[in-house]
Amino acid sequence: QVQLQESGPGLVKTSETLSLTCTVSGYSISSGFYWGWIRQAPGKGLEWVASFFRSGDTFYNPSLKSRATISVDTSKNTFSLKLRSVTAADTAVYYCATPVAKNARYFDLWGRGTLVTVSS
Amino acid sequence: DIQMTQSPSSLSASIGDTVTITCRASQSISIYLNWYQETPGKAPKLLISTSSNLQSGVPSRFSGSGSETDFTLTINNVQPEDFATYYCQQSYSNLLTFGPGTKLDFK
């Protein structure tokens, strides 16, 4: 059974870097076609953050103004998100997710999400 | 970027009603439109992919249709567990975008 689990600090200081890791179990991340990060600020809607393909192609939400970076560690079967220069607007539940189907860019397998609060 | 809009932003329904939610893309996205259901404290759940493909395990009272720029999600015979927020998401572009959401609540 494939499972995704987000982890990382629940509190990040303003202007610092938010770092989250998604641990994948039950499936090799190298075999997956597409993986992504989505977030939801309190009381707000879903916002796509970033995604990457198995090929290595990576895409980021332009609204993040180049603050985000995705990296992959196949030896640990994890992928990570770093978001630099955070502000209170980055406070959100962050989800990692993937499609079960190949060649799909929707998400039907999600982690439980992790709340990150940005505060001074 | 492709912008997604949804209407209405909220609607009220009674058990057994039929409701329709509309999603519109700022440009043609073919059929690359997906629908999610979100309930508080849970990860979003994919209901429908590529406009009309009902996901395994999703009740048949949910259906989706549309192409190009205009899409709909219909829920027939609304059940108590359907009161949630619904989001559309385009996957035509590598820069994914979600709609702002439609909250379905109990009348």
Image: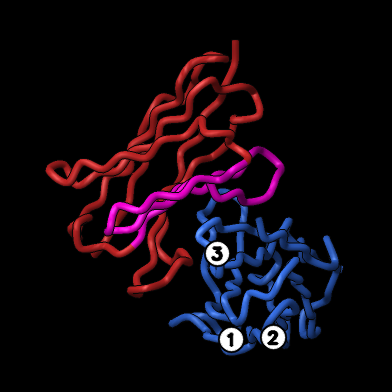
Q: Position of residue B86 (x, y in %)?
A: 68, 65
Residue picked out by circle 2: B66
Bounds of the magenta span? A34-62
- Name the subunit of mark 1: B
Q: Position of residue B78 (x, y in %)?
A: 72, 80
Q: Residue at x 59, y 43 (%)?
A: A62
Please check the rendered image and state whether residue A38 is part of the magenta-colored stretch, yes or no.
yes
The secondary element bearing badge 2 is classed as: strand
Identify which amino acid the numbered label 2 is placed on: Gly
All told, the count of numbered labels is 3
Q: Which mark is residue A36?
A: none
**Quick one: quadrant of the C terminus of chain B?**
bottom right
Residue picked out by circle 1: B52
- Name the subunit of mark 2: B
Q: Residue at x 26, y 62 (%)?
A: A32
Q: Residue at x 78, y 65 (%)?
A: B6
Identify which amino acid the numbered label 1 is placed on: Ser
